[in-house]
Amino acid sequence: MISKPKNDSFSFIRWRFSLLCGCILLSFVGLIARVAWLQIIEPDPLVKEEDMRSVRVVATPNTRGMITDRNGHLLAVSVPVEAIWADPATVLEKGGVGVSERWQALAQELNIPLDQLNSRIRQNPHARFIYLARQVEPDVVEYVQRLKLPGIAIKEESRRFYPSGDIAANLVGFTNIDDQGIEGVEKSFNALLSGTAGSRVVRKDRFGRVVEDISSTDSHPGQNVQLSIDERLQAEASHALTNAVIFNKADSGSAVVIDVNTGEVLAMANYPTFQPQ
């Protein structure tokens, strides 16, 4: 039998080894080039994609100014409350609204049918914020926090409280659920009372924890508004007007008390009135 020379076999092995080393080297060079392209030459798409996943704008709430009478007695003041909101993108990323006991407990606590809750999330698949409930009682907030559902969080808000009730309701007015004045002094001086809300741009990890503060804008609380009316005289005028309208079987009435020396309005009552919420 005739066998191949050992030199030919050795040369073939060397050639295969060289080819393998060349392929590995080319792959390594290609990998380095790709990394350089993504990190140095064209990093923007990756940065934007990462920012979309991790960067959030968090509102910094400010306090609406108070409304007082001439003696500093409160006619309108904001009290802290909380809202429950959802991040649909995160909820869907973590499997969506399920039929587990925790999701059923959330739906029951918020008085929202589970299928309706699921629908609201799926109708906004790319949204990062939708309200589920506003001005929620503290015990409900505490219960929802204990559920620890992905994409469900708490937001601080405020609700307007009117200590004088219906006595000065037509004059003071009221705000909507977003704390914006829509009647009376609340509406006329809304810009002054509202102030300016601030914000924080933060980076969060996959667990929702803040890992970096990128930038922030300071909030500016609203200014207080002091009226010339006297709460005591306002109450007297309101009660007297109510009795007069009822006694005379009228449909409505108005009464104004003015200081003749200064022209200041000390009381301004209207009937019928209402209980501001």
Image (spheres, helix red, strand yellow):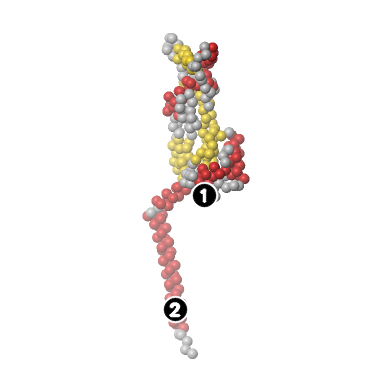
Label 2 secondary element: helix
Q: Which mark is residue 207?
A: none
Task: Say if 57 sits above or below 245 in the image.
Answer: below
**Location of residue 271 in the rendering, given as x and y in whole percent from the top left corner:** 50, 17
Q: Amino acid at mark 1?
A: Glu
Of residue 117 and residue 21, the one placed in the foreground of this image is 117
Q: Look at mark 2 in the image and give the residue it sits on.
A: 12
Q: Look at mark 1 in the image and give the residue it sits on.
A: 93
**Location of residue 73 in the rendering, given as x and y in whole percent from the top left corner:** 52, 20
How crowded pointer 2 is (Cα within 10 Å; few <14, some 14-19, many 20+) is rated as: few
Of label 1 and label 2, which has the lower sequence position? 2
State the residue at coordinates (52%, 44%).
119
Label 1 secondary element: helix
What distance separates the C-alpha of mark 1 from that of mark 2? 53 Å
State the residue at coordinates (57%, 47%).
98
Task: Say if 202 sits above or below 62 in the image.
Answer: below
Q: Say whether residue 174 is visible.
A: yes
Of residue 106 and residue 54, the one placed in the foreground of this image is 106
Task: Say if 46 sits above or below 197 in the image.
Answer: below
Q: Say whether residue 208 is visible.
A: no
Q: Amino acid at mark 2?
A: Phe
